Amino acid sequence: MLDSSRTALLVIDVQNDFIPGGQLPVPEGDLIVPLINRLARQFSQVIIAQDWHPQGHASFASRHPGKQPFDSVQLPYGEQTLWPEHCVQGTAGAELHPKLDLPHAQLIIRKGCNPDIDSYSAFLEADRGTTTGLSGYLKERGIDTVYMVGLALDFCVMFSALDARAAGFNAYVVLDACRAIDMNGSLQSAMERMQSAGVELIQSTELT
Ligand code: VGL
Ligand code: ZN
């Protein structure tokens, strides 16, 4: 059983642009929504992460002349994969999936808002220095264990899970409540990185 006062569910980037039909679709991204809704009922603390970019964000290929989506560039903080324009603040694509049913979620944390810095992680931006404040929020509320679900397993979910561990939380990723982009071996590499960081990779059946 979960110790509900010390445990939170973090629902990551379940937004229209990451669903088939959106600007950066994750295959089967829509299939996890009913499962996430069901799992969320077991948690009294639910937090939503939302990718929330200004127009012309540094992670958009369109900002870099001659570059295409899924190319990469060197930015001041390191290598950045380039994406189609997605999750632009205030657009329909940035909205949470309409079937996501999390009325008891108390916090929506928006990330990737800095025009020059990406943020896959819900904890730390890609410069690895700018914090979203999520770690402090959790700690002030006495939460020591974070379960993660959502999109994409090999980008935002992985980086959130690695940063949760680095900040001292117990971290669980519920694999069947996630889907991956899976480009250039990113899924395999994400699984290995999470495993070696001590992230527990589980199935939703282990949570009931
Ligand atoms: C994501 C690529 C760009 C994600 C966000 O949610 O995994 N991936 N922005
Ligand atoms: Zn993004």
Image (spheres, helix red, strand yellow):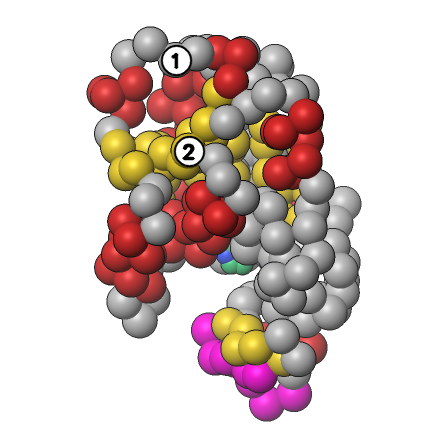
Residue that label 1 marks: 2
Task: Give the main secondary structure, helix, strand or loop, of the magenta stretch.
Answer: loop
- Tag 2: amino acid: Asn
Residue 61, magenta (yes or no)? no
Tell me if mark 1 has few (under 14), some (14-19) or many (20+) residues whose alpha carbon lies within 10 angstroms of its own: few
Residue 86, image x, y percentages = 61, 57
Look at 55% across and 55% down and name the residue there: 120
Residue at the location (69% across, 50% down)? 131
Q: Are marks 1 and 2 in contact (CB under 8 Å)?
A: no
Residue 80 rendering spot, x and y as whole percentages: 55, 74
Magenta region: 65-74
Is residue 127 left or right of 97 when viewed as pictured?
Answer: right
Can you tell which quarter of the image residue 30 is in?
top left
| Residue 1 in the image, given as x and y percentages of width and height | 33, 9
Q: In this view, does 7 lie to the left or right of 58?
A: left
Examine the rendering and report whether any part of residue 190 can be seen.
Answer: yes
Residue 180 visible (yes or no): no
Q: Which of marks 1 and 2 is nearer the N terminus?
A: 1
Quadrant, the C terminus: top left
Residue shown at the point (62%, 75%) measured from the top left: 77
Q: Mark 2 points at which residue?
A: 170
Q: Is mark 2 within 8 Å of ligand 1?
A: no
